[in-house]
Amino acid sequence: MTVAPRPLSEALAALSEARAQIAARDDPSFHQRLSELRHWQSDHVAAFHTERVAAYDGHALLRFLTRRFYRDADWSELTGRPQKVARAVDRIVDRDRPLVIAIELQAAAESLDIAMTDALLAEHATLNPHSYVRALRRVGRREARLQQILWLEELVDLVADYADNRAAWWAFKLASAPARTFGLGQTYDLLAEGFAAMRATRDLKAGTREVIAAQRARLERLIGAELEQSESDP
């Protein structure tokens, strides 16, 4: 079931809360395993889709999504002051839905990664395909993972029509100065990198549909059947 859209300030608050939960953990082994998990997921998702995106010249976009956006982005510019950031964004852009989706994606990823890290630590096992799948099935949260896929699909649908639009590209470039004025330069640079990667991808919507279909099938293969069985148990 699709989650109802919420304001940017609420999405930012959710991301801020998830990151605060991570910061509050004082066990070094948690942070080490969390970092290992993020690198592992980033590398394996990229490897899983590499041949698929090659047909669309989508390697730059795949690298952006799996590394720059998911694994390496610093969101502190946004999470420290959600209400102020939301007001600033409202003055810079006409539609904030793409940014809201980006924040929702990362907030969900942070929350799921916390749960996955705890599951891996509870098992006291080396991170490998077997321990990863066991943790994935223990954590479950199939609907949250499917929602991430739906958000990504919506994001691409929103942005794809602008990717080849020269006027839209220049309008986005013109937003750089006000973004930096409001202290959002780092966020602008991240979004600009993603926008450029989308522009470099051929037939963005078709390529995204293919990747999303494969990712959804992979998710169902890994946890769908087990969750359905567990939910039916008395």
Image: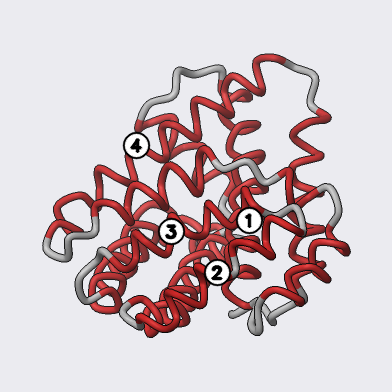
Badge 1, how many Cα within 10 Å: few under 14, some, many 20+? some
Find numbered disc 1 in the image and state the secondary structure of the residue it sits on. Answer: helix
Q: Position of residue 162 (x, y in %)?
A: 40, 81
Q: Position of residue 190 (x, y in %)?
A: 52, 52
Residue under label 3, please give it.
194
**For the residues marked 2 and 1, what is the alpha-carbon distance in whole angstroms?**
9 Å
Residue under label 4, please give it.
43
Earlier sequence position, callout 1 versus callout 3:
1
Give the number of the disc on residue 147.
Answer: 2
- The colour scheme of the drawn protein is secondary structure
**For the residues marked 4 and 1, what is the alpha-carbon distance in whole angstroms?**
19 Å
Q: Position of residue 151 (x, y in %)?
A: 52, 71
Most foreground residue, 159 or 152? 159
Viewed as shown, does residue 191 lie left or right of 110? left
Viewed as shown, does residue 39 lie left or right of 99? left
Residue under label 1, please give it.
108
Closer to the eye: label 1 or 3: 3
Closer to the eye: label 2 or 4: 4
Badge 3, how many Cα within 10 Å: few under 14, some, many 20+? many
Which amino acid is tagged 4? Asp
Which amino acid is tagged 2? Gln
